[in-house]
Every structure is written in structure tokens, then in C-alpha cells.
Image (tube, rainbow, N blue to C red):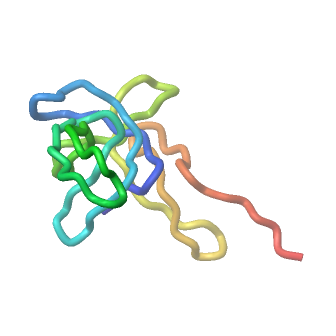
């Protein structure tokens, strides 16, 4: 899976198609992601010691990773992600359309 927590993604299929949000959590075994503000469901909470009133809560539900695409905020469009290697042999993600690095960090060793 090429997506990471904190990436901005856009929903490309389903009832929330077109919405964008940040990935909160990745469920790798189920191939699903939880995106902020997308796929909201209502959940009835039973009263407990932690929440004595209970009630109805809206929260994000997981969405399949094939239904989201990485969103490039500069270009205002979805793009595919690829991989490249730097001089030291470290792998980093790139935008396949422009070839620019997405999360390459340049840390100098002392």
C-alpha cells in the first residue's frame, strides 16, 4: 500500500465520491483506510461508566483503499504514486505525473 497516515486523499468511488480528507488510520489486513470526514456513520452508544449518558455518535467508518486516490493539493487533482531511489539507496515516493518527490527528507548525517 503506497498511502500513509497523514496523506490527503480523494474518494473516487461510492456515495462520498469527490470528497477529500486526510488519512487518520490504515487497516492493512483489511486493505481499508479511515479518512477524516468521509464515510460517516451513526453509532448508538450504550451507557457505560466512561460515558454515562450514551447516545448517538457520528464517526468515520473504514473505506476500501481502491476507492481512494492520493490528492495533490498543489495541482488540485488526484495522482498516482511511484517509487524512486536516492544516491544512498533509500526508497522514497514520487508523483508519477510530475516526477517530484512526495516525502523525500534530506537529513544530513554529522
Q: Residue at x 43, y 55 (%)?
A: 5
Callout count: 0
Which residue is situated farthest in the right direction here?
A: 110
Percent coordinates x, y for residue 11 in the rendering: 23, 34
- Up the image or down, 90 lies above or below 104; here it is below
Q: Residue at x 16, y 38 (%)?
A: 42
Percent coordinates x, y for residue 106 in the rendering: 72, 60
Q: Residue at x 33, y 52 (%)?
A: 51
Percent coordinates x, y for residue 9 in the rendering: 35, 39
Residue 98 left/right relative to 86: left
Quadrant of image for the C terminus: bottom right
Q: Residue at x 76, y 65 (%)?
A: 107
Residue 49 left/right relative to 13: right
Q: Residue 90 is drawn in which quadrant?
A: bottom right
Q: In this rendered view, identify the residue nearer to me: 25 or 54.
A: 54
Percent coordinates x, y for residue 103 in the rendering: 56, 53
- Up the image or down, 10 lies above or below 87; here it is above
Residue 2 visible within the image: no
Q: Residue 83 is drawn in which quadrant?
A: bottom left
Quadrant of image for the N terminus: bottom left
Q: Residue 87 is drawn in which quadrant?
A: bottom right
- Up the image or down, 35 lies above or below 15; here it is below
Residue 75 visible within the image: yes
- Up the image or down, 31 lies above or below 67; here it is below
Amino acid at each position: 500500500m503506497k498511502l500513509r497516515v497523514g496523506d490527503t486523499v480523494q474518494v473516487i468511488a461510492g456515495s462520498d465520491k469527490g470528497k477529500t480528507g486526510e488519512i487518520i488510520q490504515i487497516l492493512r489486513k483489511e486493505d481499508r483506510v479511515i479518512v477524516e470526514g468521509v464515510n460517516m456513520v451513526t453509532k448508538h452508544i450504550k451507557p457505560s461508566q466512561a460515558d454515562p449518558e450514551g447516545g448517538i455518535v457520528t464517526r468515520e467508518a473504514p473505506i476500501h483503499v481502491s476507492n481512494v486516490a492520493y490528492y495533490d493539493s498543489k495541482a488540485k487533482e488526484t495522482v498516482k504514486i511511484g517509487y524512486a531511489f536516492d544516491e544512498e539507496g533509500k526508497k522514497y515516493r514520487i508523483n508519477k505525473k510530475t516526477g517530484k518527490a512526495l516525502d523525500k527528507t534530506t537529513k544530513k548525517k554529522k
